Amino acid sequence: MTAAGQRHKNLLKRLAMMSTLERNHQKSHRGRPGPELVRPGSSPHWKSTGKTEARAVMSTGDRQSIHGQWSSRLAFIMAATGSAVGLGNIWKFPYITGENGGGAFVLVYILCVAGLGIPLLMAEVMLGRRGRQTPINTMRTLAGEANASQGWQLIGWAGTLAGVLILSYYSVIGGWTIGYIVHAAIGDFSGLTGDGATSLFGDFVGSPLAQVGWHTAFMAITIVIVARGVRNGLEKAVTALIPMLVVLLLILLGYAMTTGHFMQGLTFLFSPDVTHLSGTSVLTALGHAFFTLSLGMGTIMVYGSYIPKDTSIAGTSIAVAVADTVVALIAGMAIFPIVFANGLAPGAGPRLIFETIPVAFGHMAGGTLFGTLFFVLLLIAAWTSAISLTEPAVTMLIENFNVTRRAAALWTGLATWLLGFGTVLSFNVWADVKVLGLNFFEHLDFLTSNLMLPIGAISMALFAGWVMSKTMSREELDMKSEAGYALWHVLIRIVAPIAVSIILLHAIGLY
Ligand code: PHE
């Protein structure tokens, strides 16, 4: 056996031992806090001596994640919704809708979520629950089960890297939301003019030191939660934060209704005018559908590896996609009336929130309070997504490098924090340092959203549709309706790879 084979064998053994212990541990600690990671020590429940035998001996019903499990179906839905609902929904969705003319774009986006987002979400959750490990090891195990090339584990490596890269800039923007909570709370928005908002934002991002401070704060609150583990960290945080997010969103929606421009906002969002729709808008809608659902990088695969065996994958995936879409639509319904009420441009682009929202709130009764609440909402959304972005790397360090969750969280946080300096500097000192027309931050964004996520998503679709046997995916999805399963299979096997290839080719400018 080669050295790599030997390492793999040891790893499988260790995982097997840990999973048994973890199960026993969960039985004896139900309801009580305690460490989530349990070290090996008792006899293995299933035995594996390498790829082939693992396939023969392993009963997947017995496979357990060593990192723990969600306590319920609802906990998974909340966690996955927390991952999905992020800066993508509240910051990006409104501005790309504004740039792409409103209603018709929203319609295409909803069709993309339903036709491609949901099947891909189901596929990623399914792979995760079947493999029950970090994406790298899950893909290795599942490729082994299907007798396919070990090269499929590249999906896991690329996803883990994508998570770290995305988090490095997500944390900087997340830091801005903390900074803006402070600005809002101390009344800096009151009476703010358009020029005033531009210079407030300019001064804010212009100071590398201040930005590093906010970035550090955001990374710290993320890592603290991640270090505490699946149940005591992630699950507790999302079950507290998601209801807060919903309440804040509804308060803002109620506030938007009082602006006198609510109907104008609704018309903008929901009356499709197809003359506004270009080929690029369709592709933007498609690409955003899986960025917003956190697809293609293994986050959802890890979250899927923590779900209880008897949870319906189709039902939960639909719930998450619906929740994510509803939040994006409500964010749009809350933001556009405010934009119109203040004569602001809906197509202002990425600065929409950080420049125009403060102006809007600065001129409204109760603006200090509602402006603060708005950025708290944005922070919560970014925070629960950031937590999920760390999971592929954290679980990889635990499984493959044998470190504790706390150490894994710290190392991941440290590496991403350092990388984040590149983004911090991209808004000031390095703003004009461009390679191929893009600065550091723009490269990161392009590389991850336009290349890594689509490639990850397409590879997962190909694996689930072509490599994994139908018997296996049918068993794992366990859908009530055979027609539903057949539809999923066609979407994942044929439609998704073609549609995603089109986005990808467009993104790299091949047509
Ligand atoms: N879905 C998140 C958002 O909309 C972003 C994200 C992408 C999170 C990939 C995790 C993984 O902001």
Image (tube, rainbow, N blue to C red):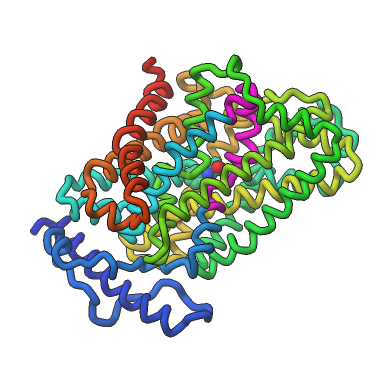
Q: Determine the main secondary structure of the stretch shown in magenta.
A: helix
**Residue 92: within the magenta?**
yes
Side of 465 where 199 appears, left or right: right
Q: Which residue occupies the foreground of this view, 254 or 338?
A: 254
Which residue is at a point 49% across and 78% down the rendered structure image? 34
Where residue 110 sits in the image (x, y, percent)?
A: 54, 35
Where residue 462 sits in the image (x, y, percent)?
A: 28, 39
Q: Which residue occupies the foreground of this view, 166 or 343?
A: 343
Which residue is at a point 43% across and 51% down the rendered structure image? 300
Q: Is residue 182 visible?
A: no
Up-down relation of residue 28 to residue 230 (above or below)? below
Q: Is residue 360 visible?
A: yes
Which residue is at a point 82% across and 24% down the rendered structure image? 343
Side of 340 where 403 appears, left or right: left
Q: Split into 4 quadrants, where in the image is the N terminus?
A: bottom left
Q: Quadrant of residue 2?
A: bottom left
Where residue 402 sits in the image (x, y, percent)?
A: 33, 65
**Residue 376: within the magenta?**
no
Side of 181 where 161 appears, left or right: left
Q: Split into 4 quadrants, where in the image is the C terminus?
A: top left
Q: What segment carries the magenta color?
A: 81-106
Which residue is at a point 57% across and 56% down the rendered structure image? 222
